[in-house]
Image (cartoon, rainbow, N blue to C red):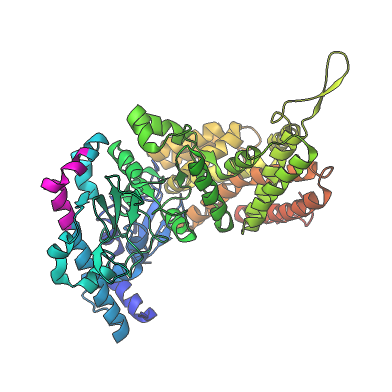
Amino acid sequence: MTLSPQWLDELRARITLSAVIGRSVRLQKAGREYRACCPFHQEKTPSFYVNDAKGFYHCFGCQAHGDVIRWLTDHQGLGFMDAVRELAAQAGMDVPQPDPAAARRQDERSLLREALAAAQDWFTAQLGGPQGEGARAYLRSRMVPAEVLRGFGFGYAPAARGQLVAALGHLGTERLVTAGLLSVTEDGQAVERFRDRITLPIRDARGRVVGFGGRLISDRPNAPKYLNSPDTPLFSKGTMLFNLDRAAPAARTKGRLIVVEGYMDVVALSAAGLDEAVAALGTALTGEQLALLWHHADCPLLCFDGDAAGRRAALKAAERALPLLQPGKSLRIVSLPPGADPDDLVRAGGAKAVESLLDRASSLVEFLWHAERDAAPVQSPEEKAALKARLLRHVEAIGNRDIAALYRRELMDRFSAFAFPPRQVTGRGHATRGRAGSAGSAVPQQASAALRARQSGGDGHRLAAAVLLGLARHPDAIGCCADLLARLAGLHPCLASATDILLDHAEHPGDGASLAAAVRAALPAGSADAMPIASERDPQQAADALREAVTLLVERPALERALAEATARFATDPEGAFAEQQRLRKRKLEFDTRLRHIAGKPAPRVGQT
């Protein structure tokens, strides 16, 4: 079904955005807008704004942006059409009817949901009945609290054939087969797919049952321990994640999403208070599942089992992610003790044991380096060349060119430090090799020293001071820059006092006139006479300009560092270093041009660095 732009515009016009968002977020009036602490990431100072007149929300911290439909899809986890139907009901509008074929498919899906909901009720009843004693004993042995059992919807499918058919046969055998509850044998008989198994419902984003997972509790020969529903019109295991409907709200609150291998790992983490966990449905992570994860968290944490199979699964997930990486979207990998899974960790040390490992999660590039370095012996020149080739294959798989270039530099720096440690002169004048992994830091240290020397004064300080003075003239804009201001102070320590004054004012507002004077007095000599940026603009334009200026000032040193390192690599990789240097110089020129435009200064000459 295609909805016309005119119909969607009418729908948006009839809905008050702040009223919809205000049901789950505490909004405060701020002039013609509303503001709040962003529901998409953790923050202390409000940077999330809602504008009813323009019909959109925007976070200046994480850049979340959208209209009322986007709010329901991104924050509430609804599908597009589900969001449209919910809003249309509120607005008193009729959703255009789909074509007859689509309407029939929708009716069929409704009938399947009815069958699955009935099966869930029946499985739950069997767990509490006489036949469920063995299943209850198993769950007691796993120390699953009763409230967790109820929350996840645990059930039991009896071992004897025919019981589900007897209970739900009035819904029709064909419907039960299509829903994945019955399987057809070679002789044409329809039998229960789940028998003598603890069952767990698999739900969609709206919490509706679309399939089941079953854990065998007997020693039936040749039967798989875990079994999922087959693919149906409602369920496709490669495009869904177990527990995403429950984990998504927790992930938005905590700013992270944990990915584990099995259902019981999710249950164990939830019992320990870690509700932001999901699991793949018996397959390696797919591109569709990665997209789902990145929809809810910028950097999901993969917490797979600490055995060989778990390490292979983590590497496969990393390789699947490489072509899909985008700026700000990556993975972190948690290393579990050998042979342990998240359930074991919770039993042994509770939530603290898990949190300790989550805090030490490796970045994706670090994980790839260690995985390939440890995959095979690396002693001979041939073995070192093989390691380099494996690393470069990962780089070549990355779709985003900027990320690929950065991965290449990072991995090749690690490779050079590992394979060719610098020679050290002993007390007797003999040259020896340093320990692998301890080398390769001379160039970055030299580059960092040069960068610090350039940052010790001059135009960089004056631009930063001008931004701080601009924020003092527009204190309402401080909140949207709070996190960036803390980073800016780290890059320019002599501006830390002025930055602290601004941040304190954001938390405890006072007199605006005295704020500007206090900030100027806290600036170092040579910067206090800088002209405030955006002082003559209206509040919204000033906030946008000031945030962009702070962002550029914070990101520019990393660009400088990368350029210095590329220049230093000419001796070992002249072709690659030159190409990267040219790209980075162009990027730096764009940064400087934009900064000077915001500051009202002339652009630098071509070739100026």
Q: Which of 565 and 507 is in front in this view?
A: 565
Q: Is residue 131 magenta?
A: yes
Toward the front, the furthest residue is 187
- 166 relative to 243 in the view: left or right: left
Across and down, in percent, residue 422 comes to 79, 29
Toward the top, the furthest residue is 427
Q: Nearer the viewer, residue 144 or 181?
A: 181
Q: Residue at x 84, y 42 (%)?
A: 571
Q: Is residue 287 magenta?
A: no
Q: Which residue is drawn at 23% across and 50% down?
A: 196
Q: Give the range drawn in magenta.
A: 121-137
Please say if 469 is above or below 182. above
Toward the left, the furthest residue is 130
Q: For the N terminus, which image quadrant?
A: bottom left
Asked if residue 450 can be seen in this view, the reply is no
Across and down, in percent, residue 212 comes to 28, 57
Asked if residue 154 can be seen in this view, the reply is yes
Please say if 309 is above or below 182. above
Please say if 156 is above or below 362. below
Q: Kindly report the secondary structure that dominates the magenta region of the rendered protein.
A: helix
Q: In which quarter of the image is residue 163?
A: bottom left
Across and down, in percent, residue 293 comes to 43, 53
